[in-house]
Image (cartoon, grey):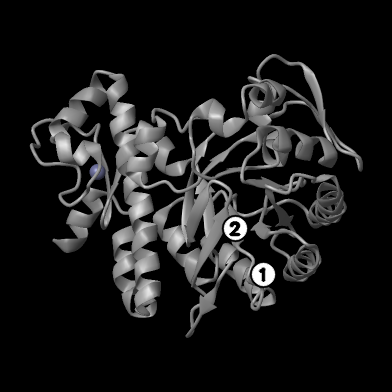
Amino acid sequence: MDGVSEGPTRARLGRLELPHGTVETPQFMPVGTNATVKALDPADLRTVGASIILSNTYHLYLRPGHERIARLGGLHAFMAWDRPILTDSGGFQVVSLGDLRVVDDDGVTFRSHLDGSIHRFTPEHAIAVQEALGADIAVAFDQPVSPSSPAAVVLDATERTHRWAARSLAAHQRADQAIFGIIQGGLDPALRAASTAYIASLPFDGICIGGLAGDETPAQREATLDVVVPLLQDDPRPRYLMGLGSPLDLLEAVHRGVDLFDSVLPARVARNGQLWVPGGRINIRNSRFLDDPRPIQDDCPCVACTTFSRAYLAHLFRADELLAYRLATCHNLTFTLDFMARIRSALRAGTFLADLPSLRLRARRVTANEAAAQSA
Ligand SMILES: [Zn+2]
């Protein structure tokens, strides 16, 4: 990856050259958990501006099965998406979704959240599943723990993650697939630094920053990034903060040197009727939108804003119509991906620091009611 950084920001422009296309960074990956970004088809995904999506190894392994997807030509052919895909390692879902899980040094035994059947992931198996799926980027198997876990738990999981990183690398064979390693270390600066140094010492194609976007505060997250990123200062490999999704969080993480993100957040809140607009957000279920003839956002190029009114969206949500989910998801992903494009434009123009205040204003999380109260 080509990288440049300048000035008192660690934000940088980059480009990932992958088998299914080029990804400009900083970039956000919509999440297609079950080989679909919920409510959208591939044409919608291209229209909202997605250049790469994430899909979940754990879910596809359980259903429909990685071997079936491989027999059907791999994940790109199966879901008819011809641009880049990253698959996660399954570690997060194994730990967070399984109601029974036993972690030992060799791997994790867990019970399927679908049918209760017992399964086992090791680093070697997680890589084999990802090679069968055939995404452009695979991720090493790790043991994530929440930021607030006790120190001994974080230390144990971090050391195991390091052993599993080396095993994941050794198991990975596909030359047409990149593999990223994952830094853990919780919120402890010394352990984070040690994890960063170890993972960066291995010949991964990219560096994931794990164990954040959980129950930490923004200040704790930023302090952790201020430990990790300076240690990678001259490292051109992409830095990927897993699981972060709100525009303001994305902006602050880019400012601290992160290149790549994924989250279900923009799509999940869209399906609840929360729509992101410059300077805030609106809840389209609010009755005051039932007579509002304006688009969600005046200058938005998405299908919802160029075709329909807030009143129509408000009606669709109240009537539980399926179209509501597609339109709202298209809008929030368009907003998020356009926001990343604005960040890249500012970096390209050399105006990122000067533009930070206006970018922060565009990304702020207040509701329309709160914004009206603030400007009154
Ligand atoms: Zn829109």
Q: Secondary structure at mark 1?
A: helix
Which residue is the site of mark 1?
228
Vertical relation: 73 (above or below) 193: above
User: In which of the image's four quarters is ligand 1 placed?
Assistant: top left
**Can residue 77 be seen?**
yes
**Can residue 364 be seen?**
no
Instruction: For label 2, count other residues whose C-alpha is less than 10 Å away and answer few (under 14), some (14-19) or many (20+).
Output: many
Which residue is the site of mark 2?
240
Q: Tell which of 345 and 370 is nearer to you.
A: 345
Residue 251 in the image, given as x and y percentages of width and height: 43, 64
Residue depicted at x 32% and y 73%: 357
User: Which quarter of the rendered picture does the N terminus lie within?
Assistant: bottom right
Q: Picture quarter containing residue 286?
A: top left
Residue depicted at x 73% and y 26%: 99
Residue depicted at x 33% and y 30%: 326
Residue depicted at x 44% and y 29%: 38
